[in-house]
Amino acid sequence: MQPVVEFANVTKSYGNVTAVDELNLRIEAGKFVTLLGPSGCGKSTTLRMLGGFEIPSSGRIMLAGKDVTRLPPNKRNVNIVFQDYALFPHMDVARNIAFGLELQGKSSDAIHRRVMELLELVQLQGYSRRFPSELSGGQRQRVALMRALAPDPQVLLLDEPLSALDAKLRQQMQIELKAIQERTGKTFLFVTHDQEEALTMSDTIVVMNEGRVEQMGDPKTLYSRPQSVFVANFIGDANLLKARIVGGDDTRMALTWNGTPVEAAATGRRAQPGDPVCIVLRPESIECSTSPLAGANSIPGKIRQRVFKGNHTSMLVEIADGSRLMALVHPTDIDSLSGEDVWVRPAGA
Amino acid sequence: MRNMFSDAPRAALGACYWAFFLYLMVPLSLMMAMSFKDANFVAFPIGQWTFDWYVAVVQDKQFLDACLYSVLIAAATTAAATVLGVWIAMLIVSVGPRGQAVLFALACLPAVVPGMISAISLRIFVSEINLPTGTAAIILGHTVHGVPFVVVMALTRLRSMPANLVDAARDLGADSVVAFFRVTLPYLGPALFGGMIFCLLLSIDDFVRTFFLGGYRPTLPMLIFARVQGGMSPEINAMATLVLVVTVSVGLYAEFLTRRARTR
Amino acid sequence: MARMVRSRLYRSTLGAVIETRPGRLVLLTAVPMLWLVAMHIGPIYEMFKISLFAGYPVEAHAAAGLTLGSYAIFFRDSLYYQPLIRSFIFAFGATAFTLVVVYPVAYYVARIVRPEGRSKALLLLLVPFWAGEIIRTFSVIMLLANRGAINALLREIGLIDRPIPMLYTSFSLGFGLVYLISLYMLLPLYSAIEKIPSHLLDAAADLGAGPFTRFRRIILPLSRDGIVSGCSLVFLTCIGVFATPILLGGPSTVLFPETISVFFHGASDRWPVGAAFSLILLVSSLITVGIFMRLVGGRGTKV
């Protein structure tokens, strides 16, 4: 299938600073795709290049098979939801949403119908005559979304649109955004630095770092099979153990960690025996017990810190070589771990 | 913290304020009061009161003509100064910081040059470009004087405008011209309107430029000036009072509008 | 608007121009730059050019040489340089007096009036601002004339028999100037004083500063920007005032603008002298303001 968006060797630099470095990216139609990365990783620049606000230094950007690399924003069929919404303060909700439709030369009848249809989609029917200053943050957010959807873009771009909302509202909007995406079947390209947002909504996550793609895949794969230390650290909490390969096949690897033999799932990258690797151990997949656990990989340690988090307690366990592991303990198990000594074991490893 | 200022200095400062207010108001009130004096010379106390001078003023052909002329010039000046001022402001916000400083200083120059010097230099300038003194020369001179004020008003507002409003308009299919007329200009809206009225009053009140650039047809300040020099009469007071009431109310209205725009 | 943009006429003209980067650049730059250079610099430049001519208009077969003769005339006759000195004295005096009178008023509005009342308190003072130069000057005559309000009042309460002549003197001129310009001082002072965060004053008070010390060590230095711009504005306005001295002053209070205007009334061949005198006035007043700004302002006290 032809991708709806394709970046081919796109580089963007400002003077000596390279914001996006030889980016290659194919985005399938109808998917919720998230560009995830820390600030300055080039994700916003990527979005702005697709929107037409930045012209790449080199490379090509294709939109539905058409080269749009140098087209101005008003000539390409993508629309953007801005971080602070950029609603026109002097127009009411209906006129904000109608703006793009008017410029497409639609009849006023058609515009009216489309605006009402969109307002209904986000349950803002009664608000068409309100001005942006009279709306709450969440309502503004929805209007900005509808304004960008109104001209029926091939791709909808969302530039950290949830960052201005408070935590509760943000979670609610995540679910609503995903629902709207599914209902409209549009391709959403979402930019965020918040891994939780990315995991909640995306079909595909593109993790970016220093202008390059670190890894691309569905949320589950990224979480359970990170291909780099950066991805492992950026998505979820991770305990990293430096180890060396001793052998294995495509799915399992035999490793050695501080002389202890360990077995782990392979990432899919080719590696030779003797190569250094990092084992990623998620805090929730560490089992803790006061006595040695059955099976391989059981390690003794000492509890250095307990932090009560409500639905779990996070524990810092110092193991023999002095490295510290973070482990999550269920409330029902915490009482038995009152002493200092503990045995830990990677669950299911 | 209530006793941070003990009450004595507080009261003294309040007295200063009201004294200053009186100082500003007394001469103007006296001028207005005198317009009701029932005698054909200017002297206090007023004694008999009358409305006759107002009847005389509104039938005074010269006065009515001067009103019309002043308004005409002010309207043309305001239109020209607004277009130019906004255009210059748009240029200023789109260049780099050093260019901004240079252009801003250049744009404000006519507001800094003392009135007399500005008038003389304009008089020489119109003669150099073979423009006869009269209506066109006055409008040109007033426009030069008005542009800096429009620039400052427009710039203040433009700088407070979120950068991505124009981006959003462009994203939704507007080219630069449409984005300007549909988004930037309405955003400037009320503040700009205040600036325009300021410009209007600046032109109506201007004396020195009109004096040197004008022909034989007098504007309002020219007419009043000539009458005052020709000899005092309560009719001048009535005339000045009418002009004062109109300009002050327009000015206050503009002030009200810009204030409201600022709080939006 | 949408229909206009989609029309063929638009798309083949303006629409086509802004398609290209140079087109947009020209559209944005051409008119403003032309206006700024021609109309903001042009007149001053022409004035400078003419001040170097021997006569104006330049006669067809006259020697085309430039001369500083018009500038020399200024120093030759006390009739010329005295009014300039007088202009400066009046402008200095009026500026200093206005600063002292208006500062407490601005302070009162900016710091003592409650925030929601401030714009009303300010607006009350702005009323006379919208009356023009001529009307405000004229109203001063009502107050100071021989049969004006003050003399009438004094006679009424029996303090004087004959009116005190106040009009057409230095006093009436000074009074009129201050009356004309005091509001130009108010606004810059007000906005500077209003910007001073009140927690700075609380901090100073907390450290033991009394009201006077707080004023001298905190308020005054931090309102320096307002003082500088207010004084500069008032000074430059005073220097360029033309009608007020004619209406309120007498033969012994001729200011420089009136001197200059003489060269433009009669035979026009005196224009170079008038132009030269204007430039002398412009340069000397700008230098004065420059020195003032250097001395008082700009020592990096931004809050």
Image (tube, rainbow, N blue to C red):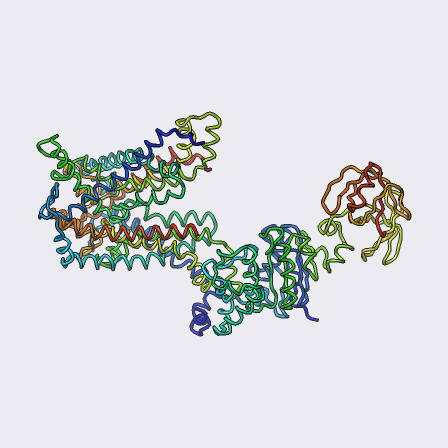
With C289 as the anchor, is A146 left or right in this view? right
Quarter of the rendering containing residue A76: bottom right
Q: Foreground: A9 or A218?
A: A218
Which residue lies at the image location 65% right of the left edge and 50% below the top edge? A38
Percent position (x, y) of residue B122?
A: 26, 52
Please indicate, yes or no, whether residue A219 appears anywhere in the rendered image.
yes
With C222 as the anchor, is B134 left or right in this view? left
Q: Foreground: B75 or B249?
A: B249
Which residue lies at the image location 36% right of the left edge and 41% below the top edge? C188
- What count of labels does the image hold? 0
Percent position (x, y) of residue C116?
A: 40, 44
Please state, as top left, top right, bottom left or bottom right, where the N terminus of chain C lies in the image.
Answer: bottom left
Furthest toward the right, the residue is: A295
Image vertical order of residue A127 relative to residue B6, above or below? below
Please indicate, yes or no, whether residue A73 appears anywhere in the rendered image.
no
Image vertical order of residue B44 relative to residue A134, above or below? above
With C185 as the anchor, is B56 left or right in this view? left
Percent position (x, y) of residue C302?
A: 45, 37
Percent position (x, y) of residue B212?
A: 21, 51
Q: Foreground: C139 or C161?
A: C161
